Image (tube, rainbow, N blue to C red):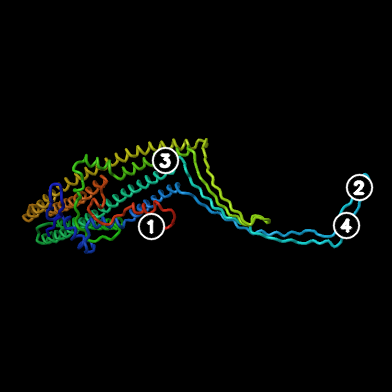
Amino acid sequence: MSRRFIYEDHVGTLRLRRGTLFGIIAWATCQGTGLPARADTINQALIKAYENNPQLNSQRAVVRATDEGVPQALSGYKPTITATGQFAQEYTSQLAKVGATRNVTVPTLPTGTATVSVPTAGAAYPRTEFGYSPSNVQVTATQTLYNGFQTANRTRLAEANTSAARETLRVTEQTILLNAATAYMDLLRDGALLELQRRNVEVLQEQLRQTRARLIVGEVTRTDVAQAESSLAQGRATVLTAESNFARSKAAYRQVIGVEPNALVSAAPIDRLIPRRLVDAVAIGRARHPNVGVAMFGIDAAVLQVKINEGSLYPQVRLAGTVQQNWETNLTTTLQQFNAFVQGQVTVPLYQGGTEYSLIRQAKETVGQKRIDLDTARDAVQATIAATWGQLEAAKAQILATQAQVAASEIALNGVREEARVGQRTTLDILNAQQALVNARTALVTAQHDRVVASYALVAAVGELNLPKLGLNIPLYDPMVHYQQVRDAWIGVRTPDGR
Protein backbone atom coordinates (compact mmCIF):
# COMPACT_ATOMS: atom_id res chain seq x y z
CA MET A 1 0.00 0.00 0.00
CA SER A 2 1.42 3.35 -1.03
CA ARG A 3 0.43 6.25 1.24
CA ARG A 4 2.03 9.61 1.92
CA PHE A 5 2.15 12.36 4.53
CA ILE A 6 2.28 15.80 2.91
CA TYR A 7 2.85 19.17 4.56
CA GLU A 8 4.10 22.56 3.45
CA ASP A 9 7.75 23.10 4.37
CA HIS A 10 9.99 26.13 3.84
CA VAL A 11 11.66 24.28 0.98
CA GLY A 12 8.45 23.15 -0.69
CA THR A 13 6.17 20.13 -0.53
CA LEU A 14 7.79 17.10 1.10
CA ARG A 15 6.52 13.67 0.09
CA LEU A 16 7.61 10.78 2.23
CA ARG A 17 8.53 7.50 0.68
CA ARG A 18 6.47 4.37 0.62
CA GLY A 19 6.37 2.59 3.97
CA THR A 20 6.81 5.53 6.39
CA LEU A 21 3.34 4.83 7.84
CA PHE A 22 2.82 8.30 9.35
CA GLY A 23 1.18 9.16 6.07
CA ILE A 24 -1.50 6.51 6.56
CA ILE A 25 -2.65 7.76 9.95
CA ALA A 26 -6.19 8.47 8.78
CA TRP A 27 -6.43 4.85 7.66
CA ALA A 28 -4.50 3.34 10.55
CA THR A 29 -6.28 5.10 13.38
CA CYS A 30 -9.64 4.20 11.87
CA GLN A 31 -9.00 0.60 10.83
CA GLY A 32 -6.29 -0.49 13.25
CA THR A 33 -6.93 1.27 16.56
CA GLY A 34 -10.70 1.12 16.96
CA LEU A 35 -11.45 4.84 16.56
CA PRO A 36 -14.75 5.91 14.94
CA ALA A 37 -14.71 6.19 11.16
CA ARG A 38 -15.60 9.91 11.06
CA ALA A 39 -12.37 11.90 10.80
CA ASP A 40 -11.34 15.03 12.72
CA THR A 41 -8.75 17.61 11.72
CA ILE A 42 -6.38 19.39 14.07
CA ASN A 43 -8.31 22.64 13.58
CA GLN A 44 -11.52 20.93 14.70
CA ALA A 45 -9.71 19.62 17.76
CA LEU A 46 -8.47 23.12 18.61
CA ILE A 47 -11.99 24.52 18.29
CA LYS A 48 -13.40 21.82 20.57
CA ALA A 49 -10.70 22.48 23.15
CA TYR A 50 -11.46 26.22 23.00
CA GLU A 51 -15.14 25.53 23.63
CA ASN A 52 -15.00 22.60 26.07
CA ASN A 53 -11.81 22.73 28.13
CA PRO A 54 -12.75 23.20 31.82
CA GLN A 55 -9.48 24.92 32.71
CA LEU A 56 -10.15 27.57 30.10
CA ASN A 57 -13.74 28.03 31.25
CA SER A 58 -12.51 28.36 34.83
CA GLN A 59 -10.10 31.14 33.86
CA ARG A 60 -12.90 32.95 32.06
CA ALA A 61 -14.88 32.88 35.32
CA VAL A 62 -11.83 34.34 37.10
CA VAL A 63 -11.83 37.24 34.63
CA ARG A 64 -15.55 37.85 35.20
CA ALA A 65 -15.00 37.87 38.96
CA THR A 66 -12.13 40.34 38.54
CA ASP A 67 -14.41 42.62 36.49
CA GLU A 68 -16.49 43.21 39.62
CA GLY A 69 -13.58 45.06 41.19
CA VAL A 70 -14.29 48.03 38.92
CA PRO A 71 -17.90 48.73 40.06
CA GLN A 72 -16.73 48.15 43.63
CA ALA A 73 -14.12 50.88 43.20
CA LEU A 74 -16.60 53.18 41.42
CA SER A 75 -18.92 52.90 44.42
CA GLY A 76 -16.68 55.46 46.12
CA TYR A 77 -18.20 58.11 43.82
CA LYS A 78 -21.74 57.17 44.83
CA PRO A 79 -23.62 58.09 48.00
CA THR A 80 -24.44 55.69 50.80
CA ILE A 81 -28.05 55.79 51.98
CA THR A 82 -29.39 54.09 55.09
CA ALA A 83 -32.88 54.01 56.60
CA THR A 84 -33.60 53.30 60.25
CA GLY A 85 -37.02 52.71 61.77
CA GLN A 86 -37.91 52.40 65.46
CA PHE A 87 -41.34 51.34 66.67
CA ALA A 88 -42.32 50.81 70.33
CA GLN A 89 -45.36 50.32 72.54
CA GLU A 90 -45.30 51.75 76.09
CA TYR A 91 -47.83 50.99 78.82
CA THR A 92 -47.99 52.72 82.27
CA SER A 93 -50.16 51.82 85.30
CA GLN A 94 -50.16 54.31 88.28
CA LEU A 95 -51.82 54.02 91.72
CA ALA A 96 -52.56 57.37 93.63
CA LYS A 97 -54.01 58.01 97.11
CA VAL A 98 -56.97 60.44 97.12
CA GLY A 99 -59.43 61.26 100.07
CA ALA A 100 -60.80 63.73 102.85
CA THR A 101 -58.40 65.18 105.44
CA ARG A 102 -58.73 66.94 108.84
CA ASN A 103 -56.44 69.35 110.65
CA VAL A 104 -54.81 68.20 113.90
CA THR A 105 -52.87 70.46 116.30
CA VAL A 106 -49.76 68.87 117.83
CA PRO A 107 -47.26 70.32 120.35
CA THR A 108 -43.75 71.22 119.16
CA LEU A 109 -40.46 71.89 120.99
CA PRO A 110 -39.38 73.88 122.78
CA THR A 111 -42.81 75.42 123.21
CA GLY A 112 -45.64 75.88 120.81
CA THR A 113 -47.95 73.97 118.62
CA ALA A 114 -48.28 73.01 114.87
CA THR A 115 -51.20 72.06 112.67
CA VAL A 116 -50.92 69.05 110.24
CA SER A 117 -53.41 67.57 107.80
CA VAL A 118 -54.17 63.85 108.09
CA PRO A 119 -56.58 61.73 106.00
CA THR A 120 -59.79 60.77 107.51
CA ALA A 121 -61.28 57.35 107.40
CA GLY A 122 -62.61 56.26 103.99
CA ALA A 123 -59.82 57.77 101.77
CA ALA A 124 -59.77 56.48 98.10
CA TYR A 125 -56.82 54.92 96.16
CA PRO A 126 -57.67 55.24 92.39
CA ARG A 127 -55.52 53.51 89.60
CA THR A 128 -54.57 55.38 86.44
CA GLU A 129 -53.55 53.44 83.25
CA PHE A 130 -52.38 54.87 79.94
CA GLY A 131 -50.24 53.86 76.92
CA TYR A 132 -48.72 55.37 73.79
CA SER A 133 -46.62 54.27 70.77
CA PRO A 134 -43.46 56.33 70.23
CA SER A 135 -41.92 55.68 66.80
CA ASN A 136 -39.62 57.31 64.26
CA VAL A 137 -38.15 56.82 60.80
CA GLN A 138 -34.76 58.25 59.83
CA VAL A 139 -33.02 58.35 56.43
CA THR A 140 -29.35 59.31 56.25
CA ALA A 141 -27.33 59.97 53.08
CA THR A 142 -23.57 60.42 53.02
CA GLN A 143 -21.50 61.56 50.04
CA THR A 144 -17.71 61.65 49.90
CA LEU A 145 -16.53 64.86 48.26
CA TYR A 146 -12.78 64.45 48.57
CA ASN A 147 -10.60 61.62 49.89
CA GLY A 148 -7.19 62.32 48.44
CA PHE A 149 -8.15 60.92 45.00
CA GLN A 150 -8.34 57.45 46.51
CA THR A 151 -11.54 56.57 44.64
CA ALA A 152 -10.07 57.53 41.27
CA ASN A 153 -6.90 55.58 41.94
CA ARG A 154 -8.81 52.55 43.22
CA THR A 155 -10.84 52.58 40.00
CA ARG A 156 -7.70 52.68 37.88
CA LEU A 157 -6.19 49.92 40.01
CA ALA A 158 -9.25 47.73 39.48
CA GLU A 159 -9.07 48.35 35.74
CA ALA A 160 -5.38 47.39 35.73
CA ASN A 161 -6.21 44.17 37.57
CA THR A 162 -8.94 43.44 35.04
CA SER A 163 -6.53 43.98 32.15
CA ALA A 164 -3.99 41.69 33.84
CA ALA A 165 -6.68 39.02 34.22
CA ARG A 166 -7.43 39.24 30.50
CA GLU A 167 -3.74 38.76 29.70
CA THR A 168 -3.71 35.75 32.01
CA LEU A 169 -6.69 34.43 30.08
CA ARG A 170 -4.66 34.80 26.88
CA VAL A 171 -1.88 32.78 28.49
CA THR A 172 -4.37 30.07 29.42
CA GLU A 173 -5.86 30.07 25.91
CA GLN A 174 -2.41 29.63 24.39
CA THR A 175 -1.57 26.85 26.83
CA ILE A 176 -4.81 24.99 26.10
CA LEU A 177 -4.43 25.34 22.32
CA LEU A 178 -0.82 24.12 22.50
CA ASN A 179 -1.86 21.23 24.74
CA ALA A 180 -4.65 20.39 22.32
CA ALA A 181 -2.29 20.39 19.33
CA THR A 182 0.19 18.27 21.28
CA ALA A 183 -2.51 15.81 22.36
CA TYR A 184 -3.73 15.56 18.78
CA MET A 185 -0.25 14.88 17.43
CA ASP A 186 0.55 12.46 20.29
CA LEU A 187 -2.51 10.40 19.43
CA LEU A 188 -1.65 10.61 15.75
CA ARG A 189 1.93 9.47 16.41
CA ASP A 190 1.01 6.67 18.79
CA GLY A 191 -1.65 5.43 16.39
CA ALA A 192 0.96 5.30 13.62
CA LEU A 193 3.51 3.57 15.85
CA LEU A 194 0.91 1.03 16.92
CA GLU A 195 0.06 0.25 13.32
CA LEU A 196 3.77 0.09 12.49
CA GLN A 197 4.43 -2.46 15.23
CA ARG A 198 1.42 -4.53 14.21
CA ARG A 199 2.65 -4.68 10.65
CA ASN A 200 6.10 -5.57 11.93
CA VAL A 201 4.58 -8.53 13.79
CA GLU A 202 2.89 -9.62 10.55
CA VAL A 203 6.23 -9.52 8.76
CA LEU A 204 7.94 -11.44 11.57
CA GLN A 205 5.21 -14.06 11.51
CA GLU A 206 5.78 -14.56 7.79
CA GLN A 207 9.51 -14.68 8.37
CA LEU A 208 9.05 -17.37 11.01
CA ARG A 209 6.83 -19.37 8.68
CA GLN A 210 9.40 -19.24 5.90
CA THR A 211 12.22 -20.15 8.29
CA ARG A 212 10.35 -23.20 9.54
CA ALA A 213 9.69 -24.24 5.96
CA ARG A 214 13.38 -23.91 5.14
CA LEU A 215 14.23 -25.92 8.25
CA ILE A 216 12.16 -28.82 6.92
CA VAL A 217 14.15 -28.88 3.68
CA GLY A 218 17.46 -28.47 5.54
CA GLU A 219 18.36 -24.98 4.36
CA VAL A 220 18.59 -23.53 7.89
CA THR A 221 19.17 -24.84 11.37
CA ARG A 222 17.07 -24.85 14.53
CA THR A 223 19.05 -21.81 15.63
CA ASP A 224 17.56 -19.74 12.80
CA VAL A 225 14.05 -20.77 13.86
CA ALA A 226 14.77 -19.79 17.47
CA GLN A 227 16.05 -16.41 16.34
CA ALA A 228 12.88 -15.81 14.33
CA GLU A 229 10.72 -16.90 17.27
CA SER A 230 12.62 -14.55 19.59
CA SER A 231 12.14 -11.58 17.25
CA LEU A 232 8.44 -12.35 16.94
CA ALA A 233 8.05 -12.49 20.73
CA GLN A 234 9.84 -9.18 21.08
CA GLY A 235 7.64 -7.68 18.36
CA ARG A 236 4.48 -8.78 20.15
CA ALA A 237 5.73 -7.26 23.42
CA THR A 238 6.40 -4.00 21.58
CA VAL A 239 2.83 -4.06 20.25
CA LEU A 240 1.53 -4.27 23.82
CA THR A 241 3.63 -1.26 24.80
CA ALA A 242 2.37 0.65 21.75
CA GLU A 243 -1.23 -0.18 22.67
CA SER A 244 -0.62 1.16 26.18
CA ASN A 245 0.88 4.38 24.81
CA PHE A 246 -2.03 4.77 22.41
CA ALA A 247 -4.57 4.34 25.23
CA ARG A 248 -2.73 6.91 27.31
CA SER A 249 -2.69 9.41 24.44
CA LYS A 250 -6.37 8.79 23.83
CA ALA A 251 -7.15 9.59 27.47
CA ALA A 252 -5.03 12.75 27.30
CA TYR A 253 -6.90 13.79 24.15
CA ARG A 254 -10.21 13.38 25.96
CA GLN A 255 -8.95 15.38 28.95
CA VAL A 256 -7.63 18.35 26.97
CA ILE A 257 -10.11 18.56 24.09
CA GLY A 258 -13.16 17.41 26.01
CA VAL A 259 -14.54 14.81 23.58
CA GLU A 260 -13.67 11.32 22.51
CA PRO A 261 -11.40 11.22 19.44
CA ASN A 262 -12.54 10.16 16.01
CA ALA A 263 -10.19 9.09 13.27
CA LEU A 264 -7.52 11.75 12.87
CA VAL A 265 -6.35 13.44 9.68
CA SER A 266 -2.68 14.21 9.14
CA ALA A 267 -1.72 17.66 10.41
CA ALA A 268 0.56 20.31 8.92
CA PRO A 269 3.00 22.69 10.63
CA ILE A 270 2.01 26.33 10.91
CA ASP A 271 5.22 27.81 9.53
CA ARG A 272 3.24 30.65 7.91
CA LEU A 273 2.74 32.15 11.37
CA ILE A 274 6.40 31.97 12.38
CA PRO A 275 8.62 35.04 11.87
CA ARG A 276 11.35 34.59 9.28
CA ARG A 277 14.22 35.30 11.67
CA LEU A 278 14.89 34.44 15.29
CA VAL A 279 15.60 38.07 16.13
CA ASP A 280 12.18 39.07 14.80
CA ALA A 281 10.48 36.36 16.86
CA VAL A 282 12.28 37.56 20.00
CA ALA A 283 11.31 41.18 19.39
CA ILE A 284 7.65 40.27 18.89
CA GLY A 285 7.58 38.01 21.94
CA ARG A 286 9.21 40.55 24.27
CA ALA A 287 6.63 43.14 23.22
CA ARG A 288 3.41 41.16 22.75
CA HIS A 289 3.52 37.98 24.78
CA PRO A 290 0.65 37.89 27.32
CA ASN A 291 3.05 37.04 30.16
CA VAL A 292 4.80 40.34 29.44
CA GLY A 293 1.39 42.04 29.46
CA VAL A 294 0.60 40.57 32.87
CA ALA A 295 3.87 41.92 34.24
CA MET A 296 3.29 45.38 32.75
CA PHE A 297 -0.18 45.68 34.26
CA GLY A 298 1.31 44.47 37.53
CA ILE A 299 3.58 47.54 37.52
CA ASP A 300 0.60 49.82 36.87
CA ALA A 301 -1.30 48.26 39.75
CA ALA A 302 1.65 48.65 42.11
CA VAL A 303 2.13 52.34 41.21
CA LEU A 304 -1.56 53.02 41.78
CA GLN A 305 -1.40 51.28 45.16
CA VAL A 306 1.29 53.78 46.19
CA LYS A 307 -1.03 56.65 45.27
CA ILE A 308 -3.91 55.08 47.16
CA ASN A 309 -1.79 54.76 50.30
CA GLU A 310 -0.60 58.35 49.92
CA GLY A 311 -4.22 59.45 49.76
CA SER A 312 -4.66 58.46 53.42
CA LEU A 313 -2.50 61.49 54.34
CA TYR A 314 -4.90 63.95 52.68
CA PRO A 315 -8.00 65.52 54.32
CA GLN A 316 -11.30 63.72 53.95
CA VAL A 317 -14.39 65.77 53.09
CA ARG A 318 -17.89 64.33 53.40
CA LEU A 319 -21.42 65.71 53.15
CA ALA A 320 -24.16 64.07 55.24
CA GLY A 321 -27.90 64.73 55.35
CA THR A 322 -30.54 63.29 57.66
CA VAL A 323 -34.34 63.33 57.53
CA GLN A 324 -36.27 62.13 60.60
CA GLN A 325 -40.00 61.78 61.30
CA ASN A 326 -41.20 61.11 64.90
CA TRP A 327 -44.67 60.17 66.19
CA GLU A 328 -46.01 60.47 69.81
CA THR A 329 -42.73 61.63 71.26
CA ASN A 330 -44.34 62.40 74.65
CA LEU A 331 -47.65 62.21 76.56
CA THR A 332 -48.46 65.88 76.60
CA THR A 333 -48.48 67.91 73.42
CA THR A 334 -46.16 66.54 70.76
CA LEU A 335 -47.89 64.04 68.47
CA GLN A 336 -45.61 64.42 65.42
CA GLN A 337 -42.19 65.91 64.86
CA PHE A 338 -40.13 66.31 61.63
CA ASN A 339 -36.39 67.03 61.60
CA ALA A 340 -34.03 67.57 58.66
CA PHE A 341 -30.42 68.73 58.62
CA VAL A 342 -27.34 68.75 56.41
CA GLN A 343 -23.78 68.86 57.64
CA GLY A 344 -20.32 68.91 56.12
CA GLN A 345 -17.47 67.04 57.76
CA VAL A 346 -13.76 67.60 57.22
CA THR A 347 -11.29 65.18 58.75
CA VAL A 348 -7.60 66.07 58.71
CA PRO A 349 -5.28 63.19 59.68
CA LEU A 350 -2.46 64.40 61.89
CA TYR A 351 -0.82 61.21 63.11
CA GLN A 352 -2.11 57.65 63.04
CA GLY A 353 0.71 55.74 64.64
CA GLY A 354 2.89 55.63 61.52
CA THR A 355 1.06 52.80 59.79
CA GLU A 356 0.20 54.87 56.72
CA TYR A 357 3.85 55.80 56.18
CA SER A 358 4.91 52.18 56.42
CA LEU A 359 2.26 51.16 53.86
CA ILE A 360 3.54 53.78 51.42
CA ARG A 361 7.12 52.58 51.76
CA GLN A 362 5.98 48.98 51.36
CA ALA A 363 4.02 49.79 48.20
CA LYS A 364 7.04 51.55 46.69
CA GLU A 365 9.15 48.45 47.26
CA THR A 366 6.47 46.41 45.50
CA VAL A 367 6.77 48.72 42.49
CA GLY A 368 10.47 47.91 42.28
CA GLN A 369 9.71 44.19 42.53
CA LYS A 370 7.13 44.37 39.72
CA ARG A 371 9.60 46.15 37.44
CA ILE A 372 12.09 43.39 38.03
CA ASP A 373 9.34 40.85 37.33
CA LEU A 374 8.79 42.51 33.94
CA ASP A 375 12.45 42.04 33.04
CA THR A 376 12.22 38.44 34.22
CA ALA A 377 9.11 37.80 32.11
CA ARG A 378 10.75 39.23 28.99
CA ASP A 379 13.91 37.20 29.54
CA ALA A 380 11.84 34.04 30.08
CA VAL A 381 9.92 34.66 26.85
CA GLN A 382 13.16 35.22 24.95
CA ALA A 383 14.69 32.03 26.34
CA THR A 384 11.61 30.01 25.45
CA ILE A 385 11.57 31.37 21.91
CA ALA A 386 15.25 30.57 21.40
CA ALA A 387 14.86 27.04 22.76
CA THR A 388 11.73 26.33 20.70
CA TRP A 389 13.33 27.77 17.59
CA GLY A 390 16.20 25.33 18.03
CA GLN A 391 13.78 22.43 18.54
CA LEU A 392 11.96 23.33 15.33
CA GLU A 393 15.16 23.52 13.31
CA ALA A 394 16.32 20.22 14.77
CA ALA A 395 12.99 18.59 13.90
CA LYS A 396 13.30 19.78 10.30
CA ALA A 397 16.78 18.33 10.02
CA GLN A 398 15.68 15.16 11.78
CA ILE A 399 12.97 14.56 9.18
CA LEU A 400 15.48 14.78 6.33
CA ALA A 401 17.92 12.50 8.15
CA THR A 402 15.37 9.88 9.10
CA GLN A 403 13.85 9.98 5.62
CA ALA A 404 17.24 9.09 4.20
CA GLN A 405 17.61 6.45 6.92
CA VAL A 406 14.29 4.85 5.97
CA ALA A 407 15.23 4.78 2.29
CA ALA A 408 18.61 3.22 3.04
CA SER A 409 17.08 0.67 5.44
CA GLU A 410 14.52 -0.39 2.82
CA ILE A 411 17.28 -0.94 0.27
CA ALA A 412 19.38 -2.80 2.82
CA LEU A 413 16.51 -5.08 3.81
CA ASN A 414 15.70 -5.93 0.21
CA GLY A 415 19.38 -6.65 -0.45
CA VAL A 416 19.75 -8.88 2.61
CA ARG A 417 16.68 -10.85 1.61
CA GLU A 418 18.02 -11.41 -1.89
CA GLU A 419 21.41 -12.45 -0.52
CA ALA A 420 19.73 -14.81 1.94
CA ARG A 421 18.00 -16.59 -0.92
CA VAL A 422 21.36 -17.56 -2.39
CA GLY A 423 22.83 -18.47 0.99
CA GLN A 424 25.03 -15.43 1.53
CA ARG A 425 23.02 -14.08 4.48
CA THR A 426 21.55 -15.70 7.56
CA THR A 427 18.13 -15.43 9.11
CA LEU A 428 19.62 -13.22 11.82
CA ASP A 429 20.82 -10.78 9.17
CA ILE A 430 17.27 -10.51 7.81
CA LEU A 431 15.82 -9.97 11.29
CA ASN A 432 18.38 -7.30 12.10
CA ALA A 433 17.69 -5.50 8.82
CA GLN A 434 13.95 -5.69 9.46
CA GLN A 435 14.40 -4.23 12.94
CA ALA A 436 16.64 -1.48 11.57
CA LEU A 437 13.89 -0.52 9.12
CA VAL A 438 11.27 -0.49 11.88
CA ASN A 439 13.52 1.71 14.02
CA ALA A 440 14.07 4.10 11.13
CA ARG A 441 10.35 4.37 10.45
CA THR A 442 9.70 4.93 14.15
CA ALA A 443 12.26 7.73 14.19
CA LEU A 444 10.67 9.30 11.12
CA VAL A 445 7.19 9.20 12.64
CA THR A 446 8.54 10.78 15.83
CA ALA A 447 10.37 13.48 13.86
CA GLN A 448 7.22 14.35 11.93
CA HIS A 449 5.33 14.60 15.22
CA ASP A 450 8.02 16.82 16.72
CA ARG A 451 8.05 19.01 13.60
CA VAL A 452 4.36 19.91 13.89
CA VAL A 453 4.35 20.29 17.67
CA ALA A 454 7.45 22.50 17.58
CA SER A 455 5.77 24.86 15.08
CA TYR A 456 2.78 25.31 17.39
CA ALA A 457 5.08 25.69 20.40
CA LEU A 458 7.10 28.41 18.66
CA VAL A 459 4.00 30.41 17.74
CA ALA A 460 2.85 30.09 21.38
CA ALA A 461 6.29 31.20 22.60
CA VAL A 462 5.99 34.33 20.46
CA GLY A 463 2.55 34.91 22.02
CA GLU A 464 0.38 34.65 18.91
CA LEU A 465 -1.23 31.21 19.20
CA ASN A 466 -4.93 32.03 18.99
CA LEU A 467 -7.86 31.04 16.83
CA PRO A 468 -8.02 34.24 14.72
CA LYS A 469 -4.30 33.95 13.96
CA LEU A 470 -4.85 30.32 12.95
CA GLY A 471 -7.63 31.44 10.62
CA LEU A 472 -10.42 29.67 12.53
CA ASN A 473 -13.42 31.96 12.27
CA ILE A 474 -15.74 30.89 15.08
CA PRO A 475 -17.54 32.95 17.75
CA LEU A 476 -14.89 33.91 20.29
CA TYR A 477 -15.24 34.62 23.99
CA ASP A 478 -15.04 38.39 24.45
CA PRO A 479 -14.29 39.43 28.06
CA MET A 480 -15.30 43.01 27.29
CA VAL A 481 -18.96 41.99 26.99
CA HIS A 482 -19.24 41.05 30.67
CA TYR A 483 -17.12 44.03 31.71
CA GLN A 484 -19.45 46.51 30.02
CA GLN A 485 -22.48 44.78 31.53
CA VAL A 486 -21.33 45.16 35.14
CA ARG A 487 -19.14 48.27 35.10
CA ASP A 488 -21.88 50.85 35.65
CA ALA A 489 -24.42 48.66 37.42
CA TRP A 490 -25.85 50.39 40.51
CA ILE A 491 -27.96 47.54 41.90
CA GLY A 492 -28.76 43.91 41.21
CA VAL A 493 -27.44 40.53 42.38
CA ARG A 494 -28.01 38.44 39.26
CA THR A 495 -25.03 37.94 37.00
CA PRO A 496 -25.42 38.67 33.27
CA ASP A 497 -25.39 34.94 32.46
CA GLY A 498 -28.49 34.41 34.59
CA ARG A 499 -27.04 33.05 37.85
Question: Considering only order in the chain, which callout, 2 or 4, is on the residue closer to the N terminus?
Answer: 4
Between tags 4 and 2, which lies in front?
Answer: 4
Identify the image quadrant of residue 492: bottom left
Circle 1 residue: 496
Report how far apart the C-alphas of labels 3 and 4 lie in the structure. 87 Å
As shown in the figure, which amino acid type bears the numbered disc 3? Answer: Gln
Q: Position of residue 359 (x, y in %)?
A: 46, 38
Report the side of 410 relative to 198 (left or right).
left
Query: How far is mark 4 from mark 1, CA to CA?
Result: 87 Å
Q: Nearer the viewer, mark 4 or mark 1?
A: 4
Residue at 49% of width from left, 50% of height from top?
80
Q: x%, y% of residue 266?
A: 19, 56
Q: Which mark is residue 108?
A: 2
Q: Residue furthest front?
A: 333
Report crowding for label 2: few under 14, some 14 to 19, many 20 or more residues within 10 A (C-alpha). Answer: few
Q: Specify whether residue 486 is in view.
A: yes
Give me the C-alpha separation between circle 4 and circle 2. Answer: 19 Å
Which residue matches tag 3?
A: 305
Q: Nearer the viewer, mark 3 or mark 4?
A: 4
For label 4, the residue is 102
